[in-house]
Image (tube, rainbow, N blue to C red):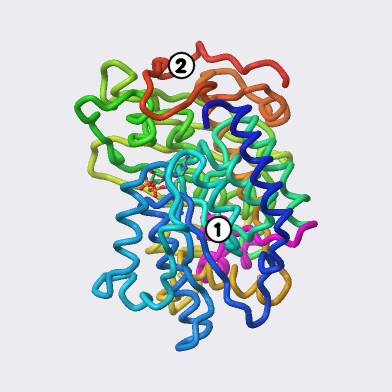
Amino acid sequence: MSNRRDFLKASAAVGGVAMASNFAGAFAAGNETIKVGLIGCGSRGRGAVANILQAEAKINGANPKVEIVAVADAFKEQTASAVKAFNNPDHEHFGPFVKQMKVTPETTFDGLDAYSKLLATDVNLVILATPPGFRPFHLEAAVKAKKHIFCEKPVAVDATGARKCYGLVEESKKANIAIVAGTQRRHQKPYIEVMKRVHDGGIGEIRAARCAWNGREPWYKKREAGQADSTYQLKNWYHFLWTCGDHIVEQHVHNLDVVNWALNDHPIKAVGFGGRAFRHPGDPKDAGQIWDHFAVEFEYKNGVRLSSYCRHFPVPQDDVSETVIGSTGLAYTRDGSAYTINGKDVLEDEKALSGYVQEHIDLLNSIRAGAPLNELKNVTDATFTAILGRNACYASGTTLKWADALASAEDITPKNFALGKPMDATPAPRPGSWKLPPRA
Ligand SMILES: NC(=O)c1ccc[n+]([C@@H]2O[C@H](COP(=O)([O-])OP(=O)(O)OC[C@H]3O[C@@H](n4cnc5c(N)ncnc54)[C@H](O)[C@@H]3O)[C@@H](O)[C@H]2O)c1
């Protein structure tokens, strides 16, 4: 990507190539082998490869019909190490599946346009696992190329990207494209059971909610000697706004999604505050720009208030949970440890398959049944809930309305991005001085 326009041009070209070649296999159903391509060969992308193969083993046992056929990444060393791991018979996760690993040098792509080259092959399904800033563009290109999609959360980092995703909802549904998102709680049996009971009136009428991702410092990469700014930003993507969206968007999106799920809606406004208390001080070109704490009050159209907190502090106590308070009871979920209504766990057997595998079981089954799951609307709602909350905090003290925030021309993708180049980084947003860009 050298700039947004080039990105769009590249995406359009990809769509053209893939549609012209008219791969019927894009809609693999029934007995066909599903050929998977991975875009973004980092830790989650590799994890998703293992998970889709584990899912297929659950579905088809000794006769799997899923193969990993192509990989793409901005950096050659990432594709190389991923393929090496995939083909390692002793690898903890990939070892059992080496026969399903069919990536060749011809289907290994690197560079910022690697995604478009992968989409021009005959893969049926793509895993989108790059940093979030690229997601709207990669989603658009994958939908145009008529590929089924597993896409990691979040799906955007700004209003422009979120509008693009909303625009793809109907288009992907009309084209019968499956889109399962990495908001895996929606595929976890105990979460599903709690939500069923909430929706069935198990806690009465919902009055309020609270959710949190209060944890510690995430990974941080120091700049290597001689590493250009742009390359460093991509390698250290968690700490730059245009790549990450800030941690309320990148991480807390999971908890916000759960509350949206409980309410079957998204908020209509938000007010909040936050800042950068502990995070690495110094030149933003090295230290990054994201904040380390946010506190937001969201309001839904039925008047329900959601108190939302997320934080990266070096303190001992963590809290990653969701609470929904009803007129007659309370639902509390803390992934991995509690899935309760009024203090009682809803399922005896909490050892149900992890959401990470179940989401791929649901994806594959839906494709084969000819009824592709499409979660793009929900994950875009959750993503934009987080973006709304983030911007309300950047604006500190000013209530931000969903409709205004979504209509804004906000676009944080750099205009001349290329690897190996000098690149500025604005300082972390200063509470209160941030202003919502005008309508697009
Ligand atoms: N659902 C979950 O629980 C969960 C957990 C972890 C991460 N994630 C999400 O997964 C995504 C990836 O996170 P990660 O931890 O794997 O990061 P990572 O840094 O380990 O991997 C990202 C990969 O993308 C590559 N990349 C960067 N820009 C690219 C581009 N333009 N084109 C192609 N490749 C590009 C990088 O080189 C790297 O290999 C993020 O959106 C993150 O939020 C989700």
In the image, residue 145 sits, relative to residue 192, either above or below, namely above
Please name the residue shown 69% across and 68% down the image: 27
| Disc on the earlier residue, 1 or 2 | 1
Q: In x, y percent, where is residue 241? A: 45, 28
Front residue (pair 127, 342) = 127
Please name the residue shown 66% across and 76% down the image: 368
- Total numbered badges shown on the rendered structure: 2
Where residue 431 is drawn, which disc sits there?
2
Under tag 1, what secondary structure? strand
Q: In x, y percent, where is residue 12? A: 68, 40
In the picture of the structure, the residue carrying the numbered disc 1 is: 126
Magenta stretch: dominant secondary structure? helix
Q: Is mark 1 within 8 Å of ligand 1?
A: no
Q: Quadrant of residue 406?
A: top right
Please name the residue shown 32% across and 54% down the image: 80
Q: In x, y percent, where is residue 292? A: 36, 30
Front residue (pair 91, 300) = 91
In the image, residue 138 sits, relative to residue 374, either above or below, namely above
Front residue (pair 406, 180) = 180
Under tag 2, what secondary structure? loop
In the image, residue 59 sits, relative to residue 209, either above or below, namely below
How far apart in space, not on screen, are marks 1 and 2 (Cα)?
39 Å
Q: In x, y percent, where is residue 381? A: 64, 44
Per the rendered image, the range of residues in magenta is 174-198
Please name the residue shown 37% across and 50% down the image: 42
- Residue 344 is at least partly visible in this image: no
- Residue 168 is at least partly visible in this image: yes
For badge 1, the amino acid type reads Val
* Quadrant position of the C terminus in the picture: top right
